[in-house]
Every structure is written in structure tokens, then in C-alpha cells.
Amino acid sequence: MVFELAASLGISVLEADLSVVDAENAEEAFITSTSFCLCPVRTYNGKQIGNGSVPGPITQSLTDAFCKLVNFDFVAQYVKTLDDG
């Protein structure tokens, strides 16, 4: 799904195994899964990714596209759950 959303937004995707150096030098990172859709990553192996601001612009664009596709703001639901906790 994320690959399809990326293509629809004109974002290039490369599926590959990353090295530690690749991860540590990334400008931005996110994890995808069925349970939490897209989740921005701030650090890897104790080191800040990019400028440390999450979500980054690509993650935000993909998150917005997914929320629009499913007509549901999963980020707002998560934040509300934290606030209600």
C-alpha cells in the first residue's frame, strides 16, 4: 500500500536491504505495518535520523494520503488515546 501511495505522489521507491550506514545517514525514516500503518522514526541505533523532527515531509505526505484513502485519521486517534490514557 505504501509503495502504491508513494507512486501516486511521485515519490520514488527502492526496495533494498539497508546497511547501518544507510540507516544512520538517512534524512528520514518510517516503519510500516498493518497495526500502525506508518510510524515515523526519530533515532536509529541511538543516533538521530536527519534533523530529528518527526514526521518528516515524505512520511507526512504518505500519512496524509493514507488517511485520505481510508477516510480515517489514525494519527489523531492515536494521539487522542494518549491524551485519554
Image (cartoon, grey):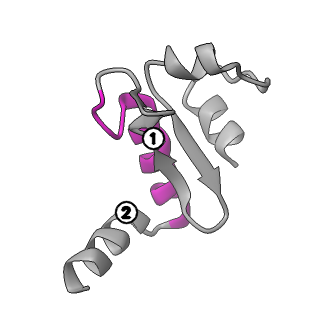
Residue numbers of the magenta segment: 52-70
Q: Position of residue 16 (x, y in %)?
A: 79, 23
**10 and 85: which is toward the camera:** 85
Q: Identify the residue position indicated by label 2 in the image.
A: 75
Q: Is residue 82 above or below residue 40?
A: below
**Which circle's residue, 1 or 2, is located before the other in the chain?**
1
The residue depicted at 54 percent of the width and 30 percent of the height is 9
The residue depicted at 47 percent of the width and 67 percent of the height is 71
Amino acid at dot 2: Val
Q: Residue furthest bottom?
A: 84
Which mark is drawn over residue 62?
Answer: none
- Which quarter of the rendering shows the C terminus? bottom left
The 10 Å Cα crowd at callout 2, few under 14, some 14 to 19, many 20 or more, is some
The residue depicted at 45 percent of the width and 30 percent of the height is 58
**15 and 69: which is toward the camera:** 15
**46 and 5: which is toward the camera:** 46
**Is residue 66 magenta-colored?**
yes
Q: Residue furthest right?
A: 16
**Is residue 23 magenta-colored?**
no
85 relative to 56 in the view: left or right: left
Q: Is residue 82 above or below residue 26?
A: below
Q: Identify the residue position indicated by label 1 in the image.
A: 41
Magenta region, mostly helix, strand or loop? helix
